[in-house]
Amino acid sequence: MTVTAPTTFGTAITGSAAAPGAPWIEGRFEENLVLTTVEQAINWARQSSIWPMTFGLACCAIEMMAAGASRYDMDRFGAGAFRATPRQADLMIVAGTVTYKMASRVRRLYNLMPDPKYVIAMGACTTGGGPYFKWGYHVVKGVDLVVPVDVYVPGCPPRPESLLEGLMRIQDKILGQRIAKQKGAVGKVADELPVPHHSGYVASAAGEGELVFDHQKITG
């Protein structure tokens, strides 16, 4: 096996006769070429190994448990290793009603998580107060008043499929992060914001009242 590194950030891996004792290398690469950048490789590894924190506040946590169980199997996305400590987690799924008494604890757990870290607001109570919005004097009207939120998952409660959709949007955000520095300027290159796809519908441009369902279909 030969490994050559060109002048760019890409690394080309070519296969030749495998060394004795390592037959899987030739079986994996054979005579193919793998070309990528350090940035893409890091982002791919990070988005495929998200570690959520074992953290549930109310009834939405039951749906989060279902998403991690065998029927929906969150581990398919590399996010099934729920950690019991915030120091080993990089994703906080706020599942349930956030009261003012709990808000300071949520903030403390968020501050204990290492960077980069992400937050999913799961359920109506977490995103905006839910049924407690008007008369719930003890409920925070949105966890984004306590911690920065990356993805909102609506529903009361949202199904496990909705949480998996939010997890995939977190993965899209991770894949769009950039680590390169700007040329002749201070700071790094701006991250690419993911564009939602495969969801929802819009009205037709003709205004005839007909709904269009395939306007975001990927072709070619």
Image (spheres, helix red, strand yellow):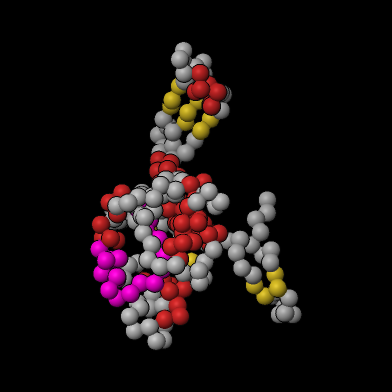
Q: Nearer the viewer, residue 124 or 18?
A: 124
Q: Is residue 124 left or right of residue 100?
A: right
Image quadrant where residue 214 sits = bottom right
Q: Position of residue 180 (x, y in %)?
A: 36, 49
Q: Nearer the viewer, residue 136 or 201?
A: 136
Q: Position of residue 122 (x, y in %)?
A: 45, 66
Residue 22 in view here: yes
Give the residue drawn at x 74%, y 80%: 208
Residue 38 falls inside the magenta stretch: no
Residue 152 in view here: no
Give the residue drawn at x 39%, y 53%: 52
Range shown magenta: 90-108
218 w.r.t. 121: above or below = above
Q: Nearer the viewer, residue 186 or 194?
A: 194
Q: Position of residue 87 (x, y in %)?
A: 27, 51
Q: Is residue 17 left or right of residue 213?
A: left
Q: Position of residue 164 (x, y in %)?
A: 51, 57
